[in-house]
Amino acid sequence: MPYRYRCNACAADGRRHGSRADAKTDRDEHRDRAHHGLIPNDEIQQEPGPLAIGVRWLLARLADRR
């Protein structure tokens, strides 16, 4: 699943990356540039891909039948 950096303090979203380490690099660059190295309220989010979305949808439909 792809990863994305999200800064809640300034509502900025980083690019989607294939690894958590690349998203952390975005985080570090954003902190240096926008917050002068301070640590805002932020997070690295794991975003579901198309397969995960499809499986969740299918499981929800199967659960509705019970």
Image (cartoon, rainbow, N blue to C red):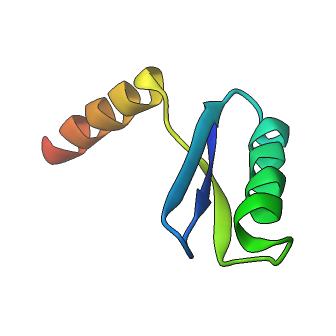
> What residue do we see at 66% from left, 63% from top?
43
Q: For residue 47, say whether it is visible.
A: yes
Q: Is residue 46 above or below residue 12?
A: above
Q: Quadrant of residue 14?
A: top right
Residue with the most extreme top position? 51
Q: Quadrant of the N terminus?
A: top right
> What residue do we see at 54% from left, 51% from top?
13
Q: Position of residue 64 (x, y in %)?
A: 15, 46
Give whichever of 64, 11 is nearer the camera. 11
Give whichever of 66, 36 is nearer the camera. 36
Q: Position of residue 19 (x, y in %)?
A: 77, 32
Q: Position of residue 38 (x, y in %)?
A: 82, 78
Q: Quadrant of residue 35?
A: bottom right
Q: Is residue 26 above or below residue 53?
A: below
Q: Position of residue 61 (x, y in %)?
A: 19, 37
> What residue do we see at 65% from left, 69% from top?
42
Q: Is residue 31 above or below residue 45?
A: below
Q: Is residue 61 left or right of 55 when viewed as pictured? A: left
Q: For residue 66, say whether it is visible.
A: no
